[in-house]
Amino acid sequence: MAKLVINNESKKSHIAPEIYGHFSEHLGRCIYEGLYVGENSDIPNVNGMRIDVVEALKEMKIPVLRWPGGCFADEYHWMDGIGPKEKRKRIINTHWGGVVEDNSFGTHEFFELTKQLGCKTYVNANLGSGTVREMSEWVEYMTFKGVSPMADLRTQNGHEEPWTVDYIGVGNENWGCGGNMRPTHYADEYRRYQTYVRNYAGNAPIQKICCGPNVDDYHWTKNVLETCFDHTPEHMHGFMDGLSLHYYTLPETEGDWNFKGSATDFTEETFYQTLKRSFFMEELINNHGAIMNQYDPNKQIGLMVDEWGIWTDVEPGTNPGFLYQQNTMRDALVAGMNLNIFNKHSDRVKMACIAQLINVLQSVMLTDGEKMIKTPTYYVFKMYRHHQDADLLSSELVGNGTVGAGKNELPKLFESVSEDKDGVITITLTNNSLEADETVDVSLTLDGGKYNVCEAQVVSGKMADHNTFEAPEVVKEQDFTAYKKTDNGISIDVPKCSVVMLRLKK
Ligand code: AHR
C-alpha cells in the first residue's frame, strides 16, 4: 500500500492549458485526410475540415495547435498556400515521403480549423530557408487590420478580418533540419528575425518562441540564452516568451533511428525501457530549467516542449516517410506520465505539444478513409483535461515501490494533483506495473474527510492493447469505482497498467 499526501493548503503554480497542446505538420496523413479532406469530399466536413475529428478534439478540449511543422516549417513558403486553390504551387515535400504537396491547406485553412476547434494558434515560421521579409509579411498578412499590402492581399483572398496569432515559432530544430546552425549563429538570427514579428496596434502581443535544444543538448540552451541576453537583459521583455525543447522516446535501441521498435509487438522489458526513457523528460526539464534560471530567474520564459511522444517503426506496409504508427496502453502510460511531469513543472513548462495530432507518431486519433478511431492516448488527454487552467497542489507518494529492473527501474506510481477555480481537486495517477494493482491511501492536509469523489475514470488494459478499425473500443475510458471514503480522504485501488483520474469535491 502507498500513501498519497496532498497539501491542499497552498497552491504551487498555475497549469497553463497549453501544456495539453498538439502539433500538426504537413507530414503523411496528418493534415490531408486526418484533418482536412476538402469541401468536395464525401467525408462529412465543414469547409473541408472533418466533422468527426473536429468534434472529438473539442470534446478532448484541445487548447492550442502548432502548424505547419516541424521540419516542414523551415521549407514552407506561406505565399504558396494562399489564393485560389487551383493556382497554388505544387511542391515536393522533401522531408516527408517526397510526395506532392498541393498547398490546398494553407493559412486561411489553418485559421478556419482553429476557429472550428476553438483553440489557440501557434504558427511556426521559416527561419532556415525563408527571409526576414517573408516572415514579417506573413505576420502582417495574418494580423494587420487596416490598409497595407498584406492586409489588402488577405482581403482579396476573401478574409478581410485579421486573425489572432497567439504564438510564433521563430524557426524549428535549427540545430538540425532547420539549417544545421550552431547555437550562437542561430541566436543572432533569432535576435534579428524576432525584431520583425510586429505586434500591430490593438492586437494582443504574439508570444515568441525561440528554438531550444534537442534532448540533452545543454550546450545549445546555454549558448542560445547567452547570445540572446548578452549585454541586453533590459530588452528581455517581449523578446522571448518561450524556448522549445524536443524529446522523443525511442523504445528500442537508444539513439538508433533505424531500429526504434514496433508500436504493438514488444516485450515486457521493452515496455519498462520505454517508460524509463520517457521518464527522462523530468531530468531534461530540471537540467534545462536550471540553465534558464541563470538568465531568467523569475521564470518569464516558458519551456515549451513542443514535440514529445513515442516514436516507433511505422506500421508494416506503410510509407516510411509518413510516420504512421499504432498506439497502445504503453502509449497511454507514456502520455499519463509525461502530462503529470509537465503539471508538476508548470512553474517553468508553459506549453507542450505531443507529436502529432493524427495519423503521425503518438496520435490521439487514426483515420482510414472515412473511418476514425480514438487511441488510448486520446482518452488520457480527455481525462486530464480537468487540469487545464487549474493550480498545481503539492503531492507526495510515500511508500511508492519501483518497477522495471536495473537501468529500467522507475517509480511504480506517478501522480499529479491540481485544484480548479471551483475548488474541485483532480488527481491523475499512472500505475506503471504490469504485475500488480496498488492500493493508494489518499489524504488531504485540510478537510480531507469532507471531500467526496464526483467523477472517476480509468484507462487500463494489457500493455499492447490497442484500438483498430475493426475493434475500435478495446481501450477506452471507463467509469472507475474502485475507491472508498476514509476519515482523511479516500482509498483507491489502482489497477496494474492503468491511468486513473479522480475528482474530489467538498
Ligand atoms: O515530428 C516529426 C519531426 O520530428 C518534426 O518535423 C521535427 O521537428 C522533428 O525532428
Image (cartoon, grey):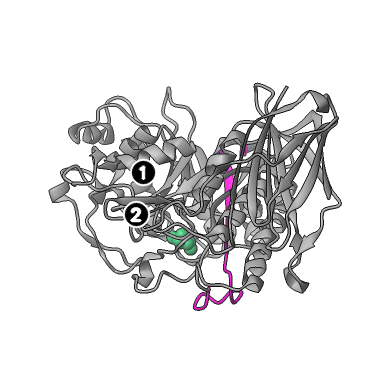
- Residue at the (33%, 47%) spot, across then down: 35
How far from the left and from the top, in percent, is residue 292?
70, 49
Magenta highlight: main SS = loop
Three-letter amino acid code of the residue under disc 2: Thr
- Label 2 element class: strand
Which residue range is magenta in the image?
Answer: 235-260
Give the label on residue 37, or none: none
Across and down, in percent, residue 153 comes to 22, 36
Element assignment for label 1: helix
What residue sits 83% from the left and 49% below the top? 2
Where does label 1 land, which residue? 53
Q: How many marks?
A: 2
Residue 380 lies left or right of residue 155; in this view the side is right
Percent coordinates x, y for residue 242 in the rendering: 58, 44
Disc assigned to residue 367? 2
| Residue 329 belongs to magenta span | no
Q: Nearer the viewer, residue 470 or 269?
A: 470
Q: Left or right? Give the position of 147 relative to 7.
A: left
* Residue 191 visible at all: no
User: Do the CB atoms of the residues marked 1 and 2 lie less than 8 Å apart?
Assistant: yes
Can the viewer see residue 392 in this picture?
Answer: yes
Q: Earlier in the sequence, mark 1 or mark 2?
A: 1
